[in-house]
Image (tube, helix red, strand yellow):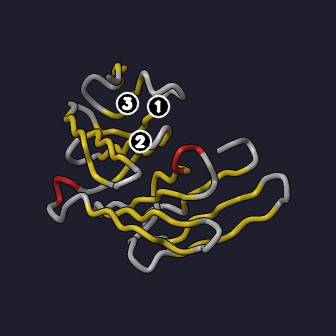
Amino acid sequence: ADGRWCVLSCGWGAPSFYVIDLEQKIQRKLTSKVLSGTEAPCFINGRAQYVFVGDRNGRAEIWDVAKEQPFKTIELGTEWSRKSIASSASTHNILAIGTKQDKMLRLYDVRSWECFHEKKFNFQGDSIYLTNDLNYATFSGWGGDRCVVLKIE
């Protein structure tokens, strides 16, 4: 987030993740009652107030760090082709989520949690980066083009 905090997932089959205060040398283990594992965590808007964390079954939760509990669940769908959240990034009220099986990049408005844009690519979306000015997004993964740079308008 701001250089003071980081968030780490425990991976497939482990529904926990860690929020770490690097300056204070404190780590908190948070455990989901919904997710099958934890993948692709990120701080919403780059601040350590809220954390996004997904799983390999197309589900994600948004957690309030101070309260140590989730307040929102996002379901990308139940069919196999929409599962496996592999990457995420957030800035300026936008949350970007990349998935493997359906090879999609989805953009959400974090004020309403509504998906306002979806785009399919010919690779599995393993990595997303949003520039701080929100002018560009990079999306990369395994297979196909492997990396694209998108101008956000």
Structural distance between the alpha carbons of marks 2 and 3: 15 Å
Is residue 62 found left or right of 85 in the rendered image? Answer: right
Task: Work out whether residue 129 or residue 37 is closer to the camera in this orientation and state it.
Answer: 129
**For marks 1 and 2 on the same chain, the one whose residue lies earlier in the sequence:** 2
Observer-side mark, 3 or 1, equals: 1
**For marks 3 and 1 on the same chain, the one whose residue lies earlier in the sequence:** 1
Task: Work out whether residue 63 or residue 121 is closer to the camera in this orientation and state it.
Answer: 63
Q: Is residue 101 above or below residue 142?
A: below
Residue located beneath label 1 in the image:
130
Residue located beneath label 2 in the image:
94
Is residue 68 found left or right of 32 in the rendered image? Answer: right
Residue 33 visible here: yes
Circles 3 and 1 in contact, beta carbons < 8 Å: no
Residue at x 61% of width, y 55% of height:
7
Residue type at mark 1?
Leu
Classify mark 3: residues with Cα within 10 Å, few (<14), some (14-19) or many (20+): many
Picture quarter containing residue 124?
top left
Q: Which numbered marker is on residue 139?
A: 3
Structural distance between the alpha carbons of marks 3 and 1: 9 Å
Residue at x 39% of width, y 40% of height:
126
Task: Work out whether residue 147 or residue 89 is closer to the camera in this orientation and state it.
Answer: 89
Residue 148 visible here: no
Residue at x 63% of width, y 64% of height:
18
